[in-house]
């Protein structure tokens, strides 16, 4: 059976958008993931602030790494995100995903995005749907 | 005063991430935006499906173009997104944002992402916060 | 097999809180429900406006009647609600629940609460989890 | 100026639905509220489980008491709720609302509903809109 470390490697090996985001994983275990990345010019929207999709994507990656650590292929079903504060090019953003509850078919996660000063950038609450398929190397 | 067309041009001129997504605007007016783009390899996650952040970002761009059409600088405050069906590289995705209600400080939008077959990929419900600042060319 | 009409009767026979709300079902079919009720004094909060829980509850009842019409016991998993406008004692509120998509294990619904003037009171987006149990008279 | 204690008394004096719910406030301070109540027969839905509107309402009351403690009249704007586990008549439910961030016009709250065994019943993430009106006795 795959360990959480194996699963993370299997996922990262092909996750091209997480790679594009420049995401660095700081810590990963079952139901948990901590990562960070730096906002680049090409991640900005028309108001010179980080595009909401970038903030969401980084939180969604942390969510995916955390919930797939259990070994079953798990996908995001519903997410609620609140944008609390903006960020811009050059800012380092830190993302921490915590499992709140793991059921049989669903999992509930809390993900926070903060900046270097510890200010909250976004609050992300995600419900994952756990498929019956196990994650394994192809 | 800026027209909705002016505003869209001001926003698109600098929106580097919308550009990276390869988004093509099909229709735009006050409180409404329709756009499409094609999923590329670099937009995939570790399971060979489009990263949730990409789907969110395209919907968020449509939302931003729709709600800023009123002329006041408006930002996403809260979004709820449901991922209904996956998509992968080569798929064209279509996004339509509709204003449901515009209040004084807030606006409420419904955004849907569909594929070429008309199947729903994601449902996005967004609340916008309307600042007091008008959008104008710099 | 139970018809949508049978199911609604089975549900209403025991739904004491829907009864307390004074809900009247105007229309019901598979994936759809329209109902209304009148806000009473005992439904108000400390600011003399209808308690958010009352508005949510009426929308949740419409959601439940709509999604259980398929015959499988279905429960609310995730809901996002936006409170657009307040209402107070004496106001009639109208609720309409529409199915947007029905999957194998999940269903996605849009529910709107309006007042007599047709103004939007609340927007409710719900994801239902479909169990494997069929609804039947006991 | 009203203290948080004054504000809670002003709110509770008229909050008829919180009273109907049988809510007992265990702790209250600025940005925080802890309360509990017992599910009664009349709070059940057609499946003999607590109506989602009741769980939402209790969480919404805690949210309101927590966010109004600042003194400015504050109302719920957007809420995302996940129903994790059911409860039924006789169950005691405990609700805890915590402020995550307080901005100028908005506030962000996390509310959890648990049962006596400490199991999570529901997760509630709320965004409050802060009006310019101060809360005062009439």
Image (cartoon, coloured by chain):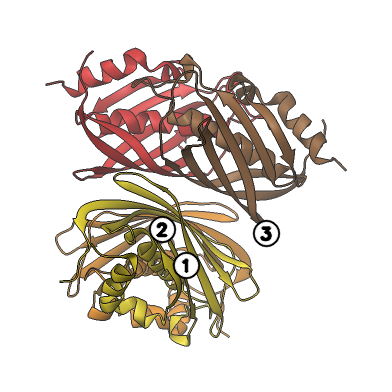
Chain colours: A yellow, B orange, C red, D brown
- 10 Å neighbourhood of mark 3: few (<14), some, or many (≥20)? few
**Label 2 chain ID:** A
In the image, are marks 1 and 3 on the same chain?
Answer: no
In this picture, residue D129 sits left or right of residue C3: right
Element marked by disc 1: loop
Q: Do the residues labelled 2 and 1 touch (CB within 8 Å)?
A: no
Q: Mark 3 lies on which chain?
A: D
Letter of the chain that mark 1 sits on in the rendering: B
Residue beneath the point at 27% across and 80% down: B42
Indicate left or right for D59 with C99 as reference: right
Reading the image, the residue beneath label 1 is B69
- In the rendered view, tell whether residue C95 sits above or below residue A60: above
| Residue C121 can be seen, yes or no | no
User: Residue A34: x and y, percent?
Assistant: 48, 69
Q: How many labels does the image show?
A: 3
Q: Is residue C32 left or right of residue A54?
A: left
Vertically, is C89 above or below D114?
A: above
- Residue hosting label 3: D103
**From the viewer's perspective, is the residue at label 2 or at label 1 nearer?**
2
Q: Between residues C117 and A65, which one lies in front from this camera angle?
A: A65
Q: Is residue A86 visible?
A: yes
The quarter of the image holding the N terminus of chain C is: top left
Per the image, the residue denoted by label 2 is: A31
Gap between marks 3 and 2 measured at Cα? 30 Å
The spot of residue D97 in percent (x, y) is 62, 43
Relative depth, front residue between B36 and D24: D24
């Amino acid at each position: 059976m795959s360990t959480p470390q194996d699963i993370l490697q299997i996922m990262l090996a092909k996750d091209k958008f997480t790679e594009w985001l420049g995401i660095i994983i700081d810590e990963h275990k079952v139901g948990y993931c901590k990562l960070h990345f730096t906002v680049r010019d090409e991640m900005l929207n028309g108001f010179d602030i980080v595009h909401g999709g970038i903030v969401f994507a980084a939180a969604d990656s942390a969510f995916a790494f955390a919930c797939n650590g259990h070994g079953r292929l798990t996908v995001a079903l519903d997410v609620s995100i609140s944008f609390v504060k903006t960020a811009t090019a050059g800012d380092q953003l830190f993302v921490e995903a915590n499992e709140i509850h793991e059921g049989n078919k669903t999992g509930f996660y809390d993900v926070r995005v903060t900046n270097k000063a510890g200010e909250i950038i976004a609050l992300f609450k995600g419900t994952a749907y756990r498929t019956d398929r196990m994650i394994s190397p192809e």
